[in-house]
Amino acid sequence: MGLIGTALWVFFCYLVGKGAKNQNRNFWVWFAISFFLSPIIGFVGITLLPRRPPSGYIE
């Protein structure tokens, strides 16, 4: 895969983690899912899950 491929893999995992963080989910959990499975699977996962309300949010 090489150095550039590995850097791109980690970068896309980072983007998935940031997307998860924007949906009030754990960055590191989604980063790890993307890293070990695939950034595509991580992206699909955070896309299909509903957005969480912020912690401490009362309806």
Image (cartoon, rainbow, N blue to C red):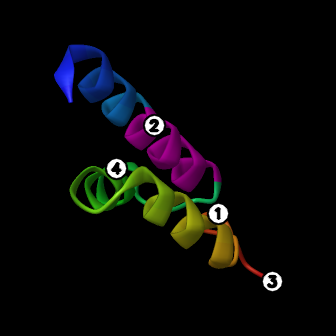
Counting from the top left corner in percent of width and height, residue 28 is at 30, 50
Is residue 18 within the magenta segment?
yes
* Residue 48 found in image quarter: bottom right
Is residue 54 within the magenta segment?
no
Q: Residue at x 38, y 26 (%)?
A: 8
| Amino acid type at image mark 3 | Glu
Q: Are marks 2 and 3 in contact (CB under 8 Å)?
A: no
Residue 12, label in figure: 2
Q: Are marks 4 and 2 in contact (CB under 8 Å)?
A: no
Q: CA distance from mark 2 to mark 1?
A: 25 Å
Q: Which residues lie in the magenta part? A: 12-22
Q: Where 53 sits versus 42, above or below?
A: below
**Residue lying farthest right?**
59
| Amino acid type at image mark 4 | Phe
* Residue at numbered disc 1: 54
Earlier sequence position, callout 4 versus callout 1: 4
Local SS, label 3? loop
Instruction: Name the image quarter holding the N terminus.
Output: top left
Number of residues whose C-alpha sits closer than 10 Å to that of mark 4, classed few (under 14), some (14–19) or many (20 or more): many
